[in-house]
């Protein structure tokens, strides 16, 4: 049976890293709305340019744009066994829209205190080509500035700079946190402590996903 999962947690909680390590076990794709917007931008599409204005300010892209993009993505063939959504839903309207499109079996909240988020985001570097995530201190690449996996260039996202980080964490507190209650009431929420190493957090998540 398909397993439709959403991953919640503040920026820097390690959602993307954890999903990258476990998705193959479940045979489902990792769908990151942030990566989808960055990809559109890289290809210079009108859609990408529209999203960029919001992203650079650390604000949310409007819900109609984002929900439409996700609806189209999860309808593709590679989602027959389910999916792992990362960065969506980000507010209650998106969570309700998602429930209108499909069933959610599990919502995994990876919880970390704000100071951990800040430290992780400020050291984060991402590959321009394959989107793999590194960290200057915790997961350094073998060669500075170069992706271990594909040799692509590593860069710091504009929205991982201090002002945008503050804005994004404030939005997380006010808009995204209430989604945890929404999934709790639906009886599908599992919460894990995300402050350990990536392997620690993966073990906790796998333990809860069964
Ligand atoms: P992320 O990589 O998930 O931190 O996303 C980077 C940026 O993409 C966010 O700060 C938003 O501007 C935009 N974005 C990603 N996911 C969403 C979403 N579900 N709703 C609205 N905007 C989003």
Image (cartoon, rainbow, N blue to C red):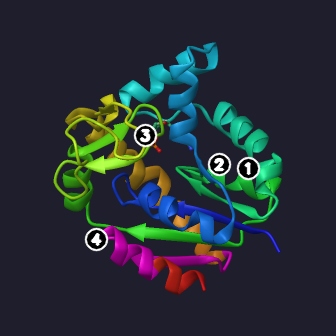
- The residue labelled by disc 3 is 150
Q: Alpha-carbon distance for marks 4 and 2?
A: 30 Å
Q: Where does residue 138 sit, x and y in percent of width and height?
A: 21, 58
Q: Nearer the viewer, mark 2 or mark 3?
A: 3
- The residue labelled by disc 1 is 97
- The residue labelled by disc 2 is 94
Label 2 neighbourhood size at 10 Å, few (<14), some (14-19), many (20+)?
some
- The residue labelled by disc 4 is 197
Q: Is residue 90 above or below residue 207?
A: above
Label 2, ligand 1: CB separation under 8 Å: yes
Q: From which residue to which does the magenta span run?
A: 186-204
Q: Nearer the viewer, mark 4 or mark 3?
A: 3
Q: Where does residue 202 sit, x and y in percent of width and height?
A: 43, 74
Task: Specify whether 76 is left or right of 90.
Answer: right
Q: Alpha-carbon distance for marks 1 and 2?
A: 5 Å
Quick one: label 4 or label 3, which is nearer the N terminus? 3
Q: Is label 4 in contact with label 3 (beta carbons under 8 Å)?
A: no
């Amino acid at each position: 049976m398909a397993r439709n999962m959403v991953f919640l947690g503040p920026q820097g909680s390690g959602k993307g890293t954890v999903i990258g390590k476990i998705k193959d076990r479940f045979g489902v794709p990792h769908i990151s709305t942030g990566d989808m917007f960055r990809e559109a931008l890289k290809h210079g599409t009108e859609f990408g340019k529209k999203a960029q204005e919001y992203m650079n300010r650390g604000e949310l892209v409007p819900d109609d744009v984002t929900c439409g993009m996700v609806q189209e993505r999860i309808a593709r063939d590679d989602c027959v066994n389910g999916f792992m959504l990362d960065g969506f839903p980000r507010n209650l309207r998106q969570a309700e829209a998602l429930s209108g499109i499909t069933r959610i079996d599990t919502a995994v909240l990876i919880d970390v205190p704000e100071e951990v988020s800040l430290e992780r985001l400020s050291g984060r570097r991402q590959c321009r080509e394959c989107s793999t995530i590194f960290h200057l201190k915790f997961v350094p690449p073998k060669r500075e500035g170069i992706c271990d996996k594909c040799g692509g260039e590593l860069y710091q996202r504009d929205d991982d700079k201090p002002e945008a980080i503050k804005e994004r964490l404030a939005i997380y507190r006010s808009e995204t946190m209430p989604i945890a209650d929404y999934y709790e009431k639906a009886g599908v929420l599992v919460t894990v402590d995300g402050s350990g190493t990536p392997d620690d957090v993966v073990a906790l998540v796998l333990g809860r996903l069964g």
